[in-house]
Image (spheres, rainbow, N blue to C red):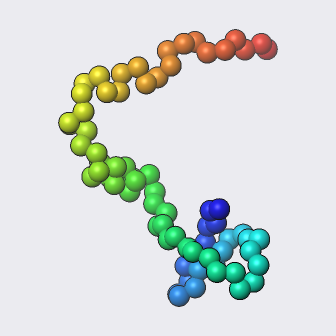
Amino acid sequence: MFIKGIKKGKNIELLEEINIPENQEIIVEIKEVSNFWTALQDFRKRVDLDSLDDDTFENLRDKSTGRDVIL
């Protein structure tokens, strides 16, 4: 289950109701929500694109014309 929340001081305000009984022990994993640019920079730190073969990204896109559309 993934629930978004907003940190306010030492509290995290959940943005939706959760169906968990009172006093139920839970584990919370904290992940900072990042924007595209931050995610791209993180990806570039983890993956050395120069070490990939020239044909690594070939044939990734489907070159078919797709399905027929009836108007």
Q: What is the quadrant of the N terminus in the image?
A: bottom right
**In the displayed image of the protein, which residue is found farthest to the front?**
25
Q: At 52% across and 70% down in the image, what residue appears?
A: 29
Q: At 44% across and 52% down in the image, what residue appears?
A: 36
Give coordinates of residue 19: x percent, y percent. Answer: 77, 71
Q: Quadrant of residue 23?
A: bottom right
Image: 68 above or below 28 = above
Give coordinates of residue 15: x percent, y percent. Answer: 68, 71
> Viewed as shown, does residue 49 lie left or right of 3?
left
> Viewed as shown, does residue 45 lie left or right of 4?
left
Image: 47 above or below 50 = below
Give coordinates of residue 70: x percent, y percent. Answer: 77, 13
Q: At 53% across and 88% down in the image, what residue appears?
A: 10
Give coordinates of residue 22: x percent, y percent. Answer: 75, 83
Residue placed most toward the observer, 55 or 20: 20
**In the displayed image of the protein, which residue is found farthest to the left?**
51
Examine the rendering and report whether any part of residue 50 can be seen.
yes
